[in-house]
Amino acid sequence: MLKHDLPIQNNLLQSRADLVEAVKQIVSPLKPYYSKGKAKLELGSTGTSYSEDIAGLEGFSRILWGLVPMLAGGERSEVWELCMQGIKNGTNPSHKEYWGEISSFDQRAVEMAAFGYALALTPERIWNPLNEQEKENLFLWLNQINQIHVYDCNWLFFPVIVNLGFKAVGLPYDQGKIRQNLDRIDEFYLEEGWYADGLNAHCDYYGPFAIHFYSLLYAKLMDKEDPERAKKYKHRAAEFAKEFIYWFASDGSALPYGRSLAYRFSQSAFWSALVFAGVESFSLGEMKGLILRNLRWWFQQPIFDANGLLTIGYGYPNLIMAENYNAPGSPYWSLKTFLILALPEEHPFWQAEEKPLPVLIEKVVQKSPRFILCRQEVLGHTLAFNAGYKHTNEHPHAAAKYEKFVYSNHFGFSVQKAEWGLSQGAFDSMLAVSEGDNLYRGKRTCLDYTVSENVIYTKWKPFGGVEIKTWLVAGAPWHIRIHCIETNRNLDYADGGFALGLENKEYKGQTAEVVLNKQESFIRYPWGASGIQSIYGNGQPDLVYPNANTNLINPRTVIPTVKGSLKPGTHWLVNAVFGEPGNEEVLKHWNMVPHVELVDDEMIITLGTEKVTIQKEGIST
């Protein structure tokens, strides 16, 4: 894959000056794309659920998440004058680039938060330079957020941030709305620091890079005025940090999971907010390492185009995986991670020596996101075995983003490109079934689930007349999947393993080592290996080559898969799945297949030092 030689890719990201330069390297290429009145950034031609004008405002506002902390820390930006001109024109009802009157559930309410952020952190840069009329225009435009409804999720924080901005510059602000919204967000709290993004909603990155991020901002700004809530937010964030750290690998990458992954390096925004608010769940050196390694990892991925603009996608430009609300400027929300630049050079964070991750245990249960996390620390591999949810949402590829059996920072996950067959469906880490018409369905929701120390159980229905019970015996590099399929229909099925990338810029021209027979399919490159073995059932291993650009990390992949057909009745299938980043031990590990013993109506699985028994009645370990 082509990699552009951009300045940011050569930034060492070691010092505060390096991070200041990184913001400039990201923002500077945007200068030619400002509209005539400077109130919009016109970055591309792809559409979104809202209008081009609103998308232009979104691009404009999201740059502030990086510029504002940089300015708050005493730095300067050559783009700021453009921003100020845009703010004056965008809030002027008489100007043709006026940002307009907003209504309930309006995307512009999201973007208003960036201006509240700027007013709160840098009033001398955004507020003081305005004349009286310009100040009134900015206030009146932003104050619309107090007159509308927002979605009942992390959006409740946007009016809060705007009102904190009003408070910072002595404007009237809605204290009642702040209290009402924060009380409502408290109802989303679960346990051990976790929030759902709404009542009965998913636990995903919206906890760390939205709800916790804004909570910590509030805790810092309102520590004296609202000490009780500030203390609560800091405590919850400290608890969450102990769990969230397991989502990060030693190389700086993190788990791709859930929606809004186009915000990329906002994965580490939580750690910046934690440092900003003065919460030390880990040492400053360890948190510094988390942030800097994540940024370094991202800036070595092909996420910028030839002009230096951030693209929509995850590991590379990719509209297939995008959300309906991803406009060309949306990815710049990732600049939130640069909140740490608000800390001055003399802050202990900048003096701390960057440290590696603390010692983490190899396997841990996280109840709120319904995960068993496994780590291969030496290989920088982290996996999340996943139970899924009893509900879904209307966002694109929700099944792929929330219902796969396992998520990996190395293999990523794949989304469906179209509906015809396994190549278009790209069913990695998923069992898919069809009625013989080549239209496959995977797991979209679950009817029931349990998460124990070693096993995840989930019951699901791909369609009427078919009920599937799945047990995932978690482990790395091997894990076991047991499926009990009760069907009144004829079915074809495909149980897909990890999607292995077919190309790697560091190993050009490498050929694969392939094993394919009646029991197993396995493929290995220097950068990793993926395989699957049929242990019980009538399955036939195969290699499925999905359509390009279905995987979030690798544009072209192969998925070892066990395929078969079933008559009406009850069927048990057992498959062993293998996935490991490239190393000298891969072949040795591939030959260490977990042992599965069938005794009457139970299956005894020996995975390493652990023994698990699966019965028709359930699980015992």
Image (cartoon, helix red, strand yellow):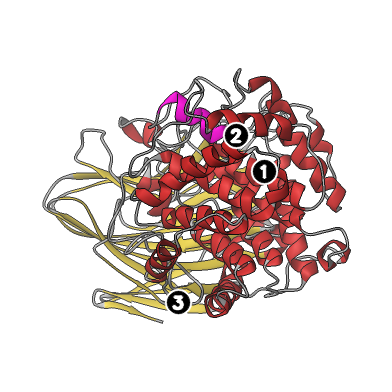
Amino acid at circle 1: Ile
Q: Residues within 10 Å of mark 3 (few under 14, many from 20)?
A: few
Residue on which disc 3 sits = 191
User: Which stretch is magenta?
Assistant: 51-60
Whole-percent x, y for residue 25 in the image: 77, 35
- Whole-Å distance between the Cαs marked 1 and 3? 39 Å
Circle 2 SS class = helix
Q: Main secondary structure of the magenta part?
A: helix
Give the residue at mark 2: 87
Q: Left or right: where does residue 6 sit relative to residue 615? A: right
Give residue 43's position: percent from left, percent from top: 58, 24
Q: Nearer the viewer, residue 139 or 448?
A: 139
What's the amino acid at mark 3? Glu
Q: Is residue 474 magenta?
A: no
Look at mark 1 in the image and give the residue it sits on.
126
Nearest-to-viewer mark from 1 and 3: 1
Q: Find the distance from the CA under tag 3 to the CA under tag 2.
A: 41 Å
* Left/right of residue 474 with respect to residue 396 in the rendered view: right
Crowd band around label 2 with a 10 angstrom C-alpha radius: few (<14), some (14–19), many (20+): many
Percent of width and height locating residue 487: 15, 54
Instruction: Identify the mark nearer the N-term, 3 or 2.
Output: 2
